[in-house]
Image: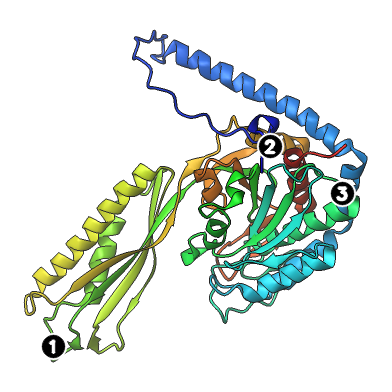
Amino acid sequence: MNDARSEIPVSTRPAAPSATPAVRPVRRGATGAPEADTSARASAASERASDIAARASDIAALAARATVAHALELVDVTDDRTVADMIELVSIPAPTFHELDRARRVRDRFVESGLPRAEIDAAGNVVARMAGAAADLRPVIVAAHLDTVFEAGVDLVVREDAGRLCAPGIADNARGLAALLALGRALLASGVRPRRPILLVATTGEEGRGDLRGVKHLFQERSPLREAAAFIALDGTGARRIVHRAVGSRRLRIDIDGVGGHSWGDRGLANPAHAVGRAIANLAALIEPDARDVALSVGRLGGGTSVNAVPEQAWLELDIRAESGASLDRIEARARAAVHGAVAAEIAARPMEPDALELRVTVIGDRPTGETPATNALVRTACAATTYFGAAPDLIAASTDANVPIALGIPAIAIGAGGESGRTHTTAEWYSNQGGVTGVQRALLVLLAVAGIAD
């Protein structure tokens, strides 16, 4: 794929860092703030506002083009189909690592829409390709994840309650998948001819221990997609949110093995479950409740075979999150020390068997950090499309499929797919279609602004 980067106005990659400048004295105003820095920030904010306003004008012109206006109308008039897709897809179980049945249905829906080349790749991703008028241009990728946080056996029957659709995974991410299908339908039926090739991808392994398996496969070493022009993830709901900063995560499995025995006859043995309890207490003390730049959470724990037995094994799984790799490394080191301290304390408290506990720490997930700068043309285009629909853009950090391309320097964002939702990641999850059409239309305009329209 050989198009020059300068030809792609919405995919400007972050500039390489320059050499560290010499330190110079800075004049400060009455408030103590550096005058030059304050002036520079004000100037940059003004420039961003002007650029977004100009892009909003471009978005309005794009939306007025006949084929694009037809595509936007199709999103509206086929909204019942989009909601029906949500209901159908959420009813197909798709726990992480077990997404195949849902993937097959998404592939079939792509084929029914007119994309016969839709296929399932080696990682279980569904990949549908739309040709661009200029086949040699680098593609734009739009993705939505297939998997949910829920294990097999969870009741997935959709209930309607006061205008809301209620089911585990209905918003995260049956909504994103339905929006992905809606984009494909609208583009094909409207006759829009994008300049760039477009890949519509339903990915695996975004949740939990999936460790972004699907998107990591897309961008594996030597993959031509590492030269993609842009990446847009459709994740969850809403029509304001623009994720341009990647919250990284380090996920650890803590296993503590012991001798085990009878709760009475072997009283005094070091207890793996007690060590896990001590570890959780130590971990909970590492992070201040109001910390804004890091997070630490024990998400799962277990062990033992009977209430009247000292367990032979106990375990926990830990999720550490931060916006910078340095912060992840720092908190991981502290977490490991806290767990080692907990095991040592349990052994010291029960000296019957001094070597009675064995600790293993395994990394089970590693999501990279990074940022597509707010000044990047892709982010500003998404902001402009948001303001076109009368909403204020909300630039945030989160952990999504976009983490991987962001870390590789590919312009990437994640946006909501419209509608409203609540109780996400619980069995009480719900979706309301208020604003649902707007979210899909926003995604369509961002996609076409990036891909371009052939004359």
Mark 2 to mark 1 CA distance (whole Å): 71 Å
Q: Quadrant of the C terminus?
A: top right
At 35% across and 76% down in the image, what residue appears?
302
Nearest to N terminus: mark 2 or mark 1: 2
Foreground tag (2 vs 1): 2
Q: Position of residue 82 (x, y in %)?
A: 79, 62
Q: Which residue is mark 3?
A: 71
At 6% across and 79% down in the image, what residue appears?
352
Amino acid type assigned to the residue bearing label 3 in the image: Ala
Query: Does 370 appear above or below 114?
Result: above
Mark 1 to mark 3 CA distance (whole Å): 72 Å
Decide which of 146, 266 is in the foreground and name it: 146
Nearest to N terminus: mark 1 or mark 3: 3
Can see residue 161?
A: no
Q: Which residue is mark 1?
A: 266
Decide which of 384, 132 is in the foreground and name it: 132
* 228 sits to left or right of 62: left
Quarter location, residue 285: bottom left
Q: Position of residue 381 (x, y in %)?
A: 69, 35
Q: Which residue is mark 2?
A: 3
